Amino acid sequence: MREVVIIGGGISGLAALTELDRAGIRCTLIEVKDRVGGSLRSEVVGGFCIDHGVMFTTDRLDAPFISALNLQDAAYVPRHDADDSYLAFRGGMQTLIDRLSESLSRHSVMFRMAVSSIGRMDTRRFAICMENGMVLDTSAILVATPARYAERIFYTLRPEMSFRLLDYRYDSIARVSLGYHLADLPDLPADPPADYPLTYLHVTDHPERVPPDHCLIQLGVRYERQKGLPIDLVGEIAALMDWPPDPVFDHISVWPESDPIMWLDEAHAKNIEILSHLLPDGIAIANSDYVTARPTLQNRIESGQQAAQRILKHLNHQRN
Ligand SMILES: Cc1cc2nc3c(=O)[nH]c(=O)nc-3n(C[C@H](O)[C@H](O)[C@H](O)COP(=O)(O)OP(=O)(O)OC[C@H]3O[C@@H](n4cnc5c(N)ncnc54)[C@H](O)[C@@H]3O)c2cc1C
């Protein structure tokens, strides 16, 4: 029988895995995609290192996870405010995922497998039902998926939880990456106008991220899911910002359900508290959808660590 199954290999699931690994627990990680990282992913395309999802966060360089994971040399402050409370990685967010994945080889990982539901096998074992019909048994389960997937996963075991996970809402964001020759951009780009649904800009000419004499501009475009994105999004942005219409490189990553916006709701914290009381022993949840404080990487990592601690408590209790 498996000791612990973690469902979802985003930052929260990986943080939980790292914590359980430290305690000597062997885990099985089930991830529906063919890679870990969830909405944190970077890739080098045409010599430009782009972030497909998150590009920087509201963490500080002295956040505990930076030193715990030995990331001091990899992180930097991408834009300055009074608290220097923005953080990015020279090699993109993938740097963090790679560091959190270092213990993966000691565990069993099942990629391209989706969990459809969980239930009880007997008083000591849970059943994990996969979409391909496979059933696994385990002593404990850590669900590290966004609420919109957890809602289905919990439906058989705890319908009361599913109802509380039903009405989650998410921002729809397109991450646009544009590469320019520095000579074609006389002024460093400024922030976008407030009345256009562009989120922050991130500009870098760091040699690890761009070819020589080039820069990478990354920005987010908030859009309505029903309407979709404009056909010539890159042309529209270039015209709006007064940039040349023909970047040497462009890429758009579309996230119809990106950031949970529930943490802005007053009732959210109460909902999370009720959810935690509804959780059966032996099951924990971890994900940014259940974070009630300011959404930072530190909070997401702590969400995974706390869920792992709950699982460890359960395993210790079962053994004694
Ligand atoms: C475009 C974009 C921009 C963002 N910008 C910011 C930002 O500026 N600042 C910030 O703080 N945050 C930002 N976020 C949010 C941040 O990326 C997420 O909150 C965080 O990465 C979520 O991590 P997670 O591990 O909690 O969940 P996820 O990354 O969603 O990971 C969950 C994993 O579970 C897997 N999974 C789901 N269902 C199943 C199933 N049934 N079976 C098996 N596996 C399953 C998924 O494939 C995924 O890998 C942004 C997100 C996006 C997409």
Image (cartoon, helix red, strand yellow):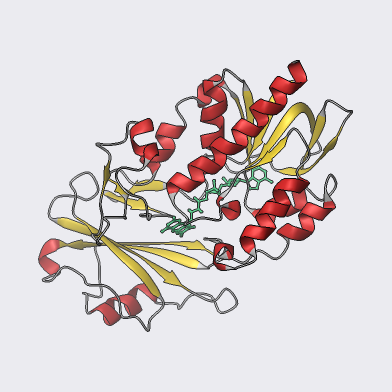
Residue 250 drawn at (x, y percent): 33, 63
Residue closer to the observer: 39 or 151: 151
Q: Tell me if 210 is positioned left or right of 28 in this view.
A: left
Residue closer to the observer: 94 or 21: 21
Residue 288 drawn at (x, y percent): 55, 51
Residue 267 drawn at (x, y percent): 65, 66
Residue at figure coordinates x 45%, y 78% from the top left: 230
Q: Tell me if 279 is positioned left or right of 217 in this view.
A: right
Position of the C terminus, as image quadrant, is: top right
Residue at figure coordinates x 76%, y 26% from the top left: 139
Q: Residue lying at the far right in this picture: please name it.
A: 122
Query: Does 111 appear above or below 167?
Result: above
Q: How many marks?
A: 0
Splitting the image into 4 quarters, where does residue 86 fall? bottom left
Q: Residue lying at the far top in this picture: please name it.
A: 320
Splitting the image into 4 quarters, where does residue 281 fall? top right
Residue 151 drawn at (x, y percent): 74, 54
Position of the N terminus, as image quadrant, is: top right
Q: Tell me if 124 is positioned left or right of 19 in this view.
A: right
Residue at figure coordinates x 60%, y 52% from the top left: 290
Residue closer to the observer: 211 or 78: 78
Residue 110 visible in the displayed image: no
Residue at figure coordinates x 16%, y 68% from the top left: 188
